[in-house]
Image (spheres, helix red, strand yellow):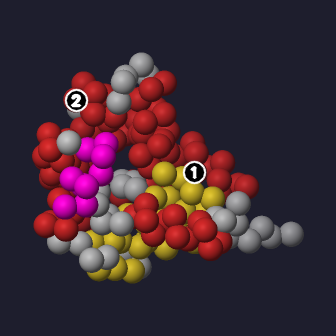
Amino acid sequence: MLKEKCHVWIITGYTGVGKTTLVDLLVKKTNVEVLAFGSVARQYCQKKGYTGVRNYFDSVSETQFVNNINKALMEKIDGLVNNFPLFIIEGLPSIVILNDLRKRDNVFTTVIYLQVSAEIRKHRILQRAKFIVKDAEWEEFSKNRFKQVLGLEEILASADYIIDAE
């Protein structure tokens, strides 16, 4: 008997565009499983003895950071694909993750890319209690550093839906 394809929704976009807000709404309505990129990254860094993602990011090359986090993310994805008919990946997975999922015969992937203006992103980031100006500035810096390493332009170009979340 042929197993149905697993549906994977990737909800992505830069920090402050509303990814978590949208995912929280979907979870309340559907009780779907969620794999949060940020949680996987934090768990990986903690396991490696770092106090935070930024500390790990600053201690290795961008490529090494992305490759190691991708590997940790793929391990989690493999478990979900085999056990759930639908789940959401929330965050900034790299183009490598997206390409891997799209090559799989047992997975149907939908990419939802959220975007807002830089001004709204900055306002939303600064409203969060866990962020301070220094971290918001780092976020802008890391956004530009990650754009090429993660292949964010390719993800945007291959998105099934682009939503203006302002």
Instruction: Work out whether residue 86 or residue 130 is closer to the camera in this orientation and state it.
Output: 130
Residue in view at x 28 percent, y 33 percent: 54
Identify the mark nearer the N-term, 2 or 1: 2
Residue 142 in the magenta stretch? The answer is no
Left or right for 128, reference 44? left
Measured from the top left, where is residue 15 in percent x and y? 29, 57
Measured from the top left, where is residue 132 in percent x and y? 20, 42
Q: Are marks 2 and 1 in contact (CB under 8 Å)?
A: no
Left or right for 104, reference 114? right
- Against 100, is 106 above or below? below
Q: Which residue is mark 1?
A: 77
Q: Residue furthest right?
A: 1
- Against 16, is 65 above or below? above
Q: CA distance from mark 2 to mark 1?
A: 26 Å
How many numbered discs sit on the rendered protein? 2
Measured from the top left, where is residue 133 in percent x and y? 15, 44
Measured from the top left, where is residue 26 in percent x and y? 55, 71
- Amino acid at dot 2: Asp
- Against 67, is 96 above or below? below
Q: Which residue is mark 2?
A: 58
Q: Is residue 104 visible?
A: no
Residue in view at x 50 percent, y 59 percent: 89
Left or right for 20, reference 26? left
- Amino acid at dot 1: Ile
Q: Is residue 93 visible?
A: yes
Residue in view at x 28 percent, y 27 percent: 55
Highlighted range, magenta: 123-131
Dot 1: element: helix
Marks 2, 1: nearer the viewer: 2
Instruction: Work out whether residue 24 or residue 7 is closer to the camera in this orientation and state it.
Output: 24
